[in-house]
Amino acid sequence: MVKKLIFPIQHWLLSQGKCVGCARSLDRQQTREKKGNILVYCKCGRIYLKEGQKYRRALFEEI
Ligand SMILES: [Zn+2]
């Protein structure tokens, strides 16, 4: 029930280039290249992967 509600919001935030946890703009966060991927480190501790102009949550094995 809760998950059904949260998922669209997180998806929307990510589509806006924002962190799903704190809504900070991911454009301004620290990035690091690893294994050919661009990882984005949000200040709240969440890690994302930048793919072109889009972001998604990094998988455990990508960190
Ligand atoms: Zn964040």
Image (cartoon, rainbow, N blue to C red):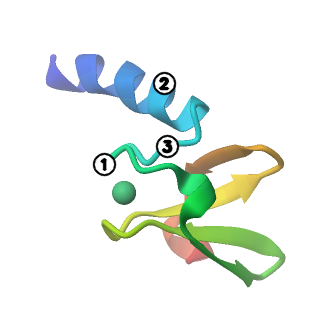
Instruction: Please state which of residues 23 and 7 is positioned toward the viewer in this rendering.
Output: 23
Residue neighbourhood size for the residue with mark 2, other residues' Cα within 10 Å, grouped as few (<14), some (14–19), many (≥20):
few
Ligand 1 quadrant in view:
bottom left
- Residue 62: numbered disc: none
Instruction: Identify the secondary structure beneath mark 3.
Output: loop
The residue under label 2 is 12
Horizontal arrangement in the rendering, residue 14 relative to residue 21 (left or right) = right
Cα distance, mark 3 to mark 2?
Answer: 9 Å
Exactly how many numbered labels are in the figure?
3
Residue placed at 49% from the left, 43% from the top? 18
Instruction: Please state which of residues 44 and 1 is positioned toward the viewer in this rendering.
Output: 44
Residue placed at 57% from the left, 32% from the top? 16
- Residue 18: numbered disc: 3
Query: Does 44 appear above or below 4?
Result: below
Cα distance, mark 3 to mark 1?
Answer: 9 Å
Residue placed at 25% from the left, 17% from the top? 5
- Residue 21: numbered disc: 1
Horizontal arrangement in the rendering, residue 9 relative to residue 37 (left or right) = left
Does the closest atom of ligand 1 sit within 8 Å of the Cβ of label 2? no
Is mark 1 in CB contact (under 8 Å) with mark 2?
no
Residue 40, image x and y in percent?
A: 58, 67
Q: Quadrant of residue 26?
A: bottom right
Q: Amino acid at mark 2?
A: Trp
Query: Does 62 appear above or below 15?
Result: below
Residue 20, image x and y in percent?
A: 38, 43
Does the closest atom of ligand 1 sit within 8 Å of the Cβ of label 1? yes
Instruction: Identify the secondary structure beneath mark 2.
Output: helix
Q: Amino acid at mark 1?
A: Gly
